[in-house]
């Protein structure tokens, strides 16, 4: 029987018995989701890679503590999110010590979708406006309180359901929905102040 047809719970049981290929399969299955969670928190591909690696190492070490109350993926994403947030705090402190001010490692999460959607038919003026809007969105997201920013970035990624995000952040789903809604309102007000209407 192929290991790819085995459930996460069965792979966890095998990994607990010392089967490293079972844990390797869990890593393969969830690598992309873990990386995207870390990227949402850190805003840097290199830092997200490191945080994802740390998350898998931590998960392997803590495998005996997984109780199955949530899915393995949700448990793993919670570890990944915590690793990324710890890394973000450390980067912010290191940057602050070095330059005496807040750094860019704040998990701003540049809206790359705007850049990627720039079509060939768009005029140079439209491309400039798109870039200005993208820059304004990044600034507004970075200016959000961390709790609002994290909730918004995870929700906007489209990779996770509200239940998963709430578990990752350790908050009730209702609180998460409020934070996402509030973050969107704050960003929209900020964009309006910058002259961007109907965004």
Image (spheres, rainbow, N blue to C red):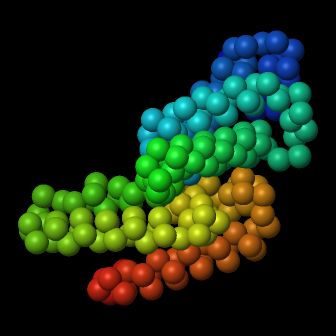
Q: Residue at x 18, y 60 (%)?
A: 119
Q: Is residue 39 visible?
A: no
Q: Quadrant of residue 29?
A: top right
Establish if 85 lies above or below 188: above
Between residues 23 and 86, which one lies in front from this camera angle?
86
Nearer-the-camera pick, 47 or 163:
47
- Write the residue at 67% across / 77% down: 178
Percent coordinates x, y for residue 86 in the rendering: 66, 45
Q: How many marks?
A: 0
Which residue lies at the image location 87% right of the left edge and 40% below the top edge? Answer: 68
Quadrant placement of the C terminus: bottom left
> Is the N terminus in the top left, top right, bottom left or bottom right quadrant?
top right
Q: Is residue 189 above or below residue 117?
A: below
Q: Is residue 192 left or right of residue 155?
A: left
* x then y, percent, for residue 132: 25, 69
Q: Nearer the viewer, residue 58 or 15?
A: 58
Q: Position of residue 173 (x, y in %)?
A: 75, 68
Q: Residue at x 83, y 28 (%)?
A: 63
């Amino acid at each position: 029987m192929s290991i790819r047809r085995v459930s996460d719970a069965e792979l966890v049981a095998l990994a607990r018995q010392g089967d490293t290929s079972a844990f390797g399969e869990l890593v393969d299955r969830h690598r992309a989701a873990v990386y995207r969670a870390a990227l949402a928190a850190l805003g840097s591909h290199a830092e997200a890679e490191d945080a994802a690696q740390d998350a898998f190492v931590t998960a392997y070490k803590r495998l005996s503590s997984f109780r199955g109350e949530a899915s393995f993926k949700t448990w793993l994403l919670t570890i990944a999110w915590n690793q990324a947030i710890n890394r973000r705090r450390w980067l912010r402190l290191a940057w602050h010590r070095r330059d005496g001010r807040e750094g860019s490692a704040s998990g701003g999460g540049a809206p790359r979708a705007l850049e990627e959607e720039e079509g060939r038919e768009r005029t140079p003026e439209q491309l400039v406006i798109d870039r200005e809007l993208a820059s304004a969105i990044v600034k507004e997201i970075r200016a959000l309180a961390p709790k609002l920013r994290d909730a918004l970035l995870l929700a906007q990624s489209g990779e996770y359901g509200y239940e998963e995000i709430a578990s990752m952040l350790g908050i009730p789903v209702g609180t998460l929905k409020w934070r996402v809604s509030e973050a969107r309102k704050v960003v929209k007000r900020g964009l309006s102040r910058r002259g961007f209407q109907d965004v």
